[in-house]
Amino acid sequence: MNTRSCLAASILLFVPLTAAAQTLDWPATVVCALSDATICTPDGCHQATLETLDVPSLIRLDLEEGVMHAVTPEHAGRQSHFKVIDSSETRIVMQGFENGRAFSGVLDEPGTLSLSAAVEGTTFSVFGRCTDLKLIVDAGR
């Protein structure tokens, strides 16, 4: 991992969205580090890796355009479109449907992201931490 990637990862872990949320406006773009995946079938639920679910470990959410972009090299070019269905000073709720799967997510003020998706007979959930992309760009200068 290069120095810039390490810096970005440390910012993701230690700088929540609280500063941006205090202005009562959400940033236009946030970057989220994903982890803690769970997959469920009618037979039960178990922990899963992001690799098993083919989910990128780093995503960029364009909140104004409603696009979730994969940032990791192995998932380059992947994106999903969503609609923001509720937004307040403390939370954004998004939903989407594509490729036969429904998904929804909640991004709250401290920068915690909860995502879930469902296809016939299977659901999965992933949690993450997010921060304003502008903070990462400014820190890298």
Image: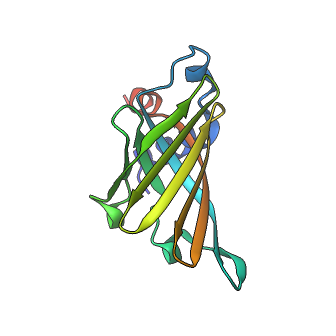
11 vs 57, nearest the viewer: 57
> For residue 112, which quarter of the picture?
top right
Q: Quadrant of the N terminus?
A: bottom left
Whether residue 4 sits left or right of residue 103 in the image: it is left
Give percent across and percent down for residue 11: 55, 38
Image side of residue 56 versus residue 92, left or right: left
Residue at coordinates 53% horizontally, 52% vertically from top-left?
104
Q: Nearer the viewer, residue 24 or 10?
A: 24
**Viewport quadrant of the C terminus:** top left
Residue that protrudes farthest toward the bottom in the picture? 43
In the current view of this chain or complex, which residue is farthest to the top?
Answer: 23
- Which colour assignment does the render follow? rainbow
Q: Position of residue 136 (x, y in %)?
A: 44, 34
Q: Is residue 22 above or below residue 83?
A: above
Residue 87 picture quarter:
top right
Q: Is residue 43 above or below residue 114?
A: below
Q: Residue at x 47, y 28 (%)?
A: 135
Residue 75 location (% of width, % of height): 34, 64
Residue found at x 46% / y 26%: 27
Q: Nearer the viewer, residue 46 or 66?
A: 66
Residue depicted at 33% across the width and 36% down the height? 65
- Number of numbered markers: 0
**Residue 126's spot in the image, x, y percent?**
60, 59
